[in-house]
Amino acid sequence: MNKKRLLEVLPRFQGKRILVVGDLFLDEYLVGRPVRVSREAPVLVLEFERRFALPGGGTNPSRNLRSLGAEVLMVGVVGDDEAGVELKGLLEAAGIDIAGVVADASRPTITKTRILAHDSNIIRQQVVRIDRLSKKPLALSVIRKLVDHLEAAIGQVDAVLLSDYKGGVISPEVVEVCRQACRRHQKLLTVDSQGDLHRFKGFGLVKSNQAEAEATLGEPLESEGAFASACRRLLDELGAGVVVITRGANGMSLMEAGGRHIHIPVANRSEVFDVTGAGDTAIAVLTLSLAVGASAVTAAHLANYAAGLVVRKMGNATTTVEEMREAVTSLQFPRVDPAQQDFLH
């Protein structure tokens, strides 16, 4: 892969309009300093120091897209509560259009509260996490509001990205409206999927992690041949344009319709502090790169570099075009099987 080609893609991110549909979370952090062990139970007593909150879940691709220069429209659901107000405020502060965010009084805003202990050296350790959420399906009236927003917006954007965190927003009705509207308006449709991948037939790009691909196909992926076979099966069964399977520390596998399997090793192995949100960064860069006309292989390499940058940071981090440009320029390019080099265009 020619680094010059990667660098040529980055300026084209600016101003692209991407619609993100997903499950919206508020990630709340309570930070305290450990002072002693409790007399009531064998647990630490933390002296409260501060609280902060960040957008999480399906908002992560939106924040990454925005930090890369895209215009972002968000569609999803929050509760009619303080957490929902705070989450919408955080998204607005990030420059994300929240006209498509529906408030549902019958359910709470999905909130993940993490209790962190830290010492004087700023070393933080997560002690426990408390999730507040509803497992009830979305009401039909709420789905109708989401559908109305989607039908009004899809014709006005360059791509649609679905971020499925199993919070109920990526319902069969929402998936079908996105599929039909994107086909009608000839828009790119991508998904970062959880659960059964067969829900996303006809998408331009389907991304999953290794565990989700194994669960869908009913077989372990333990060799390059197995990954190649899995990508081919998913392409055939889903009718997708591109399939990407992320493999954690082993990088990602890629195959596009009519092409061959390509394994891209991780760009950053040595400076990994927190892998949270790396998949969200990857789908954001994949979608944005394809939306500006980059090849699937170029998009995957850029996503690989971006993921390598955010794992250097704590929490649901984002990256920028400037950081990506520096990484592409200065970091060693991941080695790819020489037999695949003629396909890397």
Image (spheres, rainbow, N blue to C red):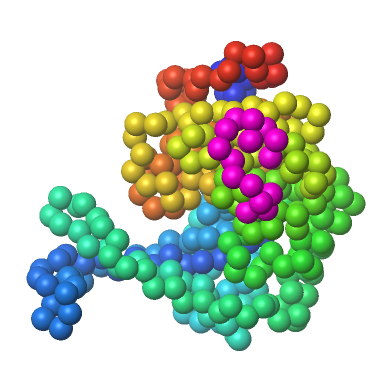
Please report the residue visible at 45 percent of the width from the left and 37 percent of the height from the top. 249
Image coordinates for residue 208, horizontal then vertical, percent: 62, 48
Image coordinates for residue 8, horizontal then vertical, percent: 62, 23
Region of the chain picked out in magenta, as a range: 215-230
Please report the residue visible at 59 percent of the width from the left and 45 percent of the height from the top. 220
Pick the residue in front: 281 or 134: 134
- Total label count? 0
Q: Is residue 334 above or below residue 35?
A: above
Please report the residue visible at 70 percent of the width from the left and 46 percent of the height from the top. 206
Image coordinates for residue 306, horizontal then vertical, percent: 50, 36
Q: What quarter of the picture does the N terminus occupy?
A: top right
Residue 29 seen anywhere in this rendered image of the structure: yes
Q: Residue furthest right?
A: 184
Image coordinates for residue 2, horizontal then vertical, percent: 59, 15
Pick the residue in front: 46 or 213: 213
Pick the residue in front: 214 or 94: 214
Q: Quadrant of residue 46?
A: bottom left
Q: Is residue 319 above or below residue 100?
A: above
Q: Main secondary structure of the magenta part?
A: helix
Residue 291 seen anywhere in this rendered image of the structure: no
Question: In the figure, is residue 41 to the left or right of 92?
Answer: left
Task: Inspect the magenta stretch and tell me whether residue 90 lies in it.
Answer: no
Question: In the figure, is residue 153 to the left or right of 222?
Answer: right
Please report the residue visible at 17 percent of the width from the left and 70 percent of the height from the top. 44
Question: In the figure, is residue 41 to the left or right of 340?
Answer: left
Q: Residue furthest bottom?
A: 106
